[in-house]
Amino acid sequence: MNVTSTPAQAVAELRAAGTDLSERRRSGVSTGPLIDIASGRYGISWGDDGTATLGALTTIAAIAADARLGAAYPGIAASAQGIATPQVRNLATLGGNLAQRSRCWYFRNPGIDCLKKGGSNCPARSGNHLYGVAFDLGPCVAPHPSTMAVALLAYDARITTERRDGLTITELLGDGSNGRADHALLPGEMITKIVLPALQTGEHATYKRAISRTHAEWALVEVCARVEIVDGTFRFVRLAAGGIAPVPLRLTACERTLQGMSANAAVIAEAAKQATSGANPLPMTGYKLDLLQGLVRDILERLAA
Amino acid sequence: MSTTTINGRVESLPDDPEALLVDVIRDRLNLTGTKLVCGSGVCGACTVLLDGEPVVSCLLPAGATAGKKLTTIEGIGDGKLHPIQKAFMAHDALQCGFCTPGFVVEATAFHRRWRAAQGTAIPSREEIAAALSGHLCRCGAYEGIYRAVAAACAGRFDGDDPIAPRVEAYDKVTGLARYTVDIRHEGQLEGVILRAPVAHARITDLDLAPARAVPGVAAVVSLLADDQMVRFVGTPIAAVAAKDRRSALEAIAAIKLNREELAAVIGLDAARREDAPVVFEKKDRKRAGNVSELNGAPTSWKGNVHGPSAPFSQKGKRARRLLAEAREACDPLLIEETFRVSTQQHACLEPHAAVARFDGDRLTVHVSTQAVHDTMEKIAKRYKLPRDKVRVIADHVGGGFGSKGSLGVETIAAIELARAAKAPVRIAFDREEELSVTGYRPAAELKLSLLPSVQGGLKALSLTAFADTGVAVNSMIAGLARLIYPAQAKELVDFDVLSNLPPGSPFRGPGGPPMAFALEQAVDEAALRMKVDPIDLRKRWDPDPNRQRLYDWASGLDVWRNREPASSRSGRYRRGVGVASGYWLYIWQPGSSIELAIKDARIIASCAVQDIGTGTRSVIANTVAKAFDLEPQDIEVRIGHSNLPEGPGSGGSRVTASIVPPTLLAIEKLKMEMERTRARPPIAGSNAPWRELIAASPDLVVSARRPPDSKAPADIKSPVRQLGLMGLVFGWMLRNFNNIVVGAGMPSSVQVMEVEVDTWLGHVRVLNAYVGLAIGKLAAPTLARSQAAGALIQGIGYALYETRETDPSTGQVLSASMDDYRIPGIADMPRLEVHFDETGFDHVPGGSVGAGEVATVPTSPAIANAICNAIGVRLTEIPFRPDRLVAALKGRAAA
Ligand code: FES
Ligand code: FES
């Protein structure tokens, strides 16, 4: 819709496939200079030690479909399969997925100012934040949109940019306290590759999101989980969640509770309650805690089965 | 300059890094089969193949396709029909057809992968749904799409071209069908509307000169009302026509305005507060828009509240007294509840659009409209033009659902810009406009009290509706509860609550779904308390003969007979079964006329009606073909042009009942003419006598107007009569002001839904839907089924997903993208059984009435009742999103 509004600040944005940026260009939310990523790393390669390196320009579809990746890092493949739609996955890149901007409907509306557009406050906080965070970690209440970031957090992935090496997801995205940005990349800094550490164990992993329809919807809550179960007990549990905070979160209290416990439904149900530990939902986002608990329970039960 | 190969041809790509592939394909190469809808990668209408893989062209920078191979819908099948296209035609996997090219392109890619890996095995519904999860169809053609894709994969369409039940199906599956947004005249300009950024203000100063100075701009016009007021975000202020969209956008950004901002009030609750800012001062009240297709009864105002309007109350005071006594006595049968329904957007895939062009003193306007004839008349009146100088054209319309029934600002602006610029001008709304300012079914708060009598009858009913109508009036929800479940007394009161939001508008069965949502849940609750089977209670309370037969059908369904009480359900996933009932009025439009001609040995049927996906062409073709033992494809149907004989608007489910009777009459006339003029009788024993006669016939023309119905049998009542004196007044007003007649008999629907609730994730899935419909004889059976399926899935959207969200302080619509306004996808379509009861309308010539509205009325309460049966909790507010489900399960109020 065409309304007179103040232009956003003119910071150059990098464009990979453009699946996030094109919409913001069309609506006028992004108006600054544009830099096309002319060339970059595409595809998946494997180290002798079993590490996988994903070029930042690898498409989500390629990640979702790669058999070896699916076997070694099932949580990564399952996460990629859950993203967007087939026609978007065929274009969208891993680097772009990590560096995409918020889906907040205030941010996306060219007629409204907000922190992320240079404004002075977050209008969603006092306004309509139905899809906002339940772990309120900073001035902006929009959850981070990247599903791959959740998966990469679960796998302790390291991110390389043209300027920096070995960034963790937390270093890449920050701790959620900077409401103005969706990531901590410097202006013009391009992600080049993502390295997944080798896995020693015979673990299981998967990903799932809670949404209202059956397919193709931004996650209300999403969880990527890895577990190793030996002799019926959890030897290793790793839970990362999205949709609930300005950055993907590890559910460490829940992980700790499960450590060494037997992998049965009763234990899981009890431990899932820990998933929400530390949450401070907004007036409209309390439901996300129920969904988070339900999702953790769902995923762990399936992994334990 | 780089190049790409599109459908085998090398094409140059623009150097502009901002150019998106969809715009290059549509605007530069004129390959208009690819559609632009959401512009955000959600709906899939813009899907093309990039080196064989489906991608969304609306997000893809054109430059990224350099050196690659692209295939658009026009390139599918290499000049022949692809098996997927044939299957879509045969299975009627389309209605308006606007989503169809995208679905077809994607499905061909799936078909190729499937055949390579699985041969002619049949893919499951889940596999098809996952492959097509990036596509949305607002008409709800999903059922046909499932069948089509499965059959094509199984190899059933590898051979000959099929016969399609929908006569224009070929054009729609090949991308040839031209919609308003596809019209491209020589020298055509692009128009854009400047809209208000605030919800309430007076424009004190509007300077259009800077816009005129922008290069490429040909015309700028003001659209401000004479009171200079802005009453909602998005109020049209001015419009610009320029050589391209970018110049037009630049120009509207250059327009200078000063405004005096006024306090705004947003939404139902805020607007009812004592101290709320007032949207319309007394002198301005006539400026309020109209959410109804009809004129409302005069009623009073108090602040922002317009009402009470209670023309259809029946012994209202007595109802109030009976209910008060029951309340006093703590009558355990008294049911009192407040229900809330939310705002539903039409979300037509083709946006509101118009292309206006003057040739001398003749005006031609292509409009995406539900009423070509009426729009022509309105334009002629507004611009004081002779009617024969105005031509309104809508060959294909990408959905309407009630939102394209009146003369809209897109048409007005296009005409005024074209006149000022002396060049053709196109205006096509963008998705944000489409999902914010083009109308909606208003949200409402519904206060209901229902009192069964000790004898088990229905004693009293009170329903008061407060509708969230934005800057419009005339919502009727409660009043519709008069025509179902007679009671000793009913108090039915409607209020409009105005606030600084865009105006509501008619939407498929206006008022029907909200009324049914409240009433049908209350009846369900009454059955639970009275320990009576909910269908049996309806049979007892609802004497309508059409619904009586549908209740018998529903009672016999296995899913109903095997249903268990809510108390028996436990565990994470809980299934439930619910029923609900609904009706709509049978209306028709006097003056509707059909011309039948034989020209060059071919029958041509003409009418200024339009096909918005509802199947009007096919209804006419079928009716004529049947009378002459021909195939529908043999009949040439000319519609969509206002210079044809007067036709009805596509609203209120009136089309079939308006055009079939004159068509039958015209057929009789044509047969008589043929008899009179024929040179020799058909060859004795011919098995195609009509075909021969037509082949030998001289050119002939006959026409007929809609005749009145014959007298209905005594048990088939006219709703107008049932309503007593007010009904007669109502009927008279409809006939004289709206040119519609309410006929006898009620199109009815009884629906049974089976749902599954995931109590952990708050997710509701409709597993099976059983839709019983009494709409008389089917003029086009396959298409009637498609209509039923479409109405059902829109009802599911209403019940489970759809809601407009606004910012409570600025009045901005937040859900103005298809990411945030969630319409159902293919995987959300349940398995469907449709039962047509074809009796009940024999007094209508041809015996058919419309299907479009009635089938969406009972869907949301049937789902609500099924959820209640599954989890033992009654949810009173739609949509039943995960947040509401988990809150209800915990006995908490949702935010
Ligand atoms: S228009 Fe491209 S996905 Fe909707
Ligand atoms: S047929 Fe799919 S949107 Fe109309």
Image: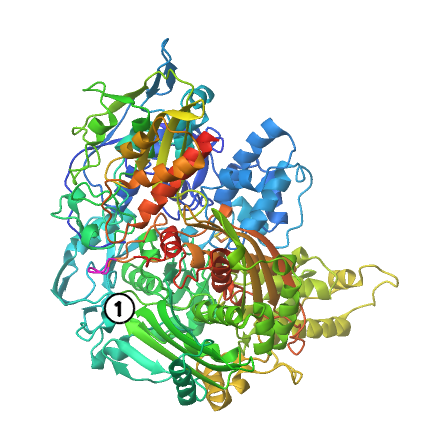
**In the rendering, at what x and y percent does residue B403 appear?**
41, 64
- Viewer-side residue, B232 vs B876: B876
Relative vertical location of residue B615 with respect to residue A52 in this rendering, above or below:
below
Q: Chain of mark 1?
A: B
**In the rendering, at what x and y percent does residue B857 appear?**
50, 66
Q: Quadrant of residue B637?
A: bottom right
Q: Is residue B856 left or right of residue B808?
A: right
Q: Which residues are magenta?
A: B807-811
Q: Quadrant of ligand 1?
A: top left
Mark 1 Cα-neighbour bin, 10 Å: few <14, some 14–19, many ≥20? some
State the residue position of label 1.
B269
Which residue lies most toward the top here?
A48
Q: Is residue B473 left or right of residue B638?
A: left
Which residue lies most toward the bottom here?
B725
Residue B351 in view, yes or no: yes
Identify the amino acid type marked 1.
Asp
**In the rendering, at what x and y percent does residue A280 appear?**
22, 45
Q: Quadrant of residue A141?
A: top left
- Viewer-side residue, B159 vs B27: B159
Give the residue at x 31% y 36%.
Answer: A241
